[in-house]
Image (cartoon, rainbow, N blue to C red):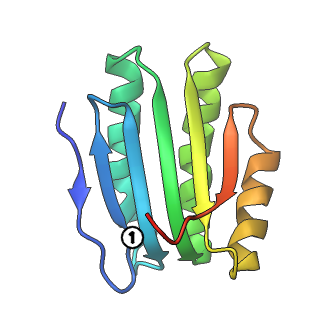
Amino acid sequence: MNDLNIQGSQSTPHINSDSGQGLLSMQGDSYPENSFEFFGPVIAWIETYLRDSQAPLRLELRLVYMNTSSVKAMMDIFDLLEEAHGQGRQVSVDWFYDPRNERVLDLADEFREDCTFPFLIAPDSPFK
């Protein structure tokens, strides 16, 4: 399975996957011109991973800002994880946020309300 290594930009997050570790990470701002196009390979990677592997999948997020279309793409990702969880798959989200940014905390909390899989929201360490 091919892993993702999408370099971040001013308007897009850095996205990295490690199928061997069962990890998908996203870090940075997310307001791409076309969220559907940008997140398409990410959604495809998740679908392939969940189809081809029975290993756990952990999504690690360090997102700072998300526009409306990025929020929609993230909802699609969480729907995939929720469906997999409902089928007995071990999936989880760890969302780390800057404690000075309460909007991101509120957004993560809103997402968590709709999920039944393990969903950690924690302040990010400044020493990472």
Residue under the point 51% across and 57% down: 61
Q: Quadrant of residue 109?
A: bottom right
| Quadrant in the picture for the N terminus | top left
Q: Is label 1 in a helix, a strand or a loop? A: loop
- Determine the image quadrant of residue 91: top right
In the image, residue 74 above or below residue 21: below
Residue 87 left/right relative to 45: right
Q: How far across and how far down the image is residue 52, in percent?
A: 32, 18
From this view, report whether residue 11 is shown above or below residue 60: below
> Which of the image's four quarters has the C terminus?
bottom left
Instruction: Indicate the position of residue 112 as horizontal and vertical percent values.
Output: 75, 48
- Residue corresponding to mark 1: 13
Q: Could you tell whether 78 is left or right of 40 in the image?
A: right
Residue in the foreground of this view, choosing between 3 and 47: 3
The residue carrying pointer 1 sits among few (fewer than 14), some (14 to 19) or many (20 or more) residues within 10 Å by Cα, namely: many
Q: Residue at x 53, y 68 (%)?
A: 63
Q: Is residue 42 above or below residue 20?
A: below
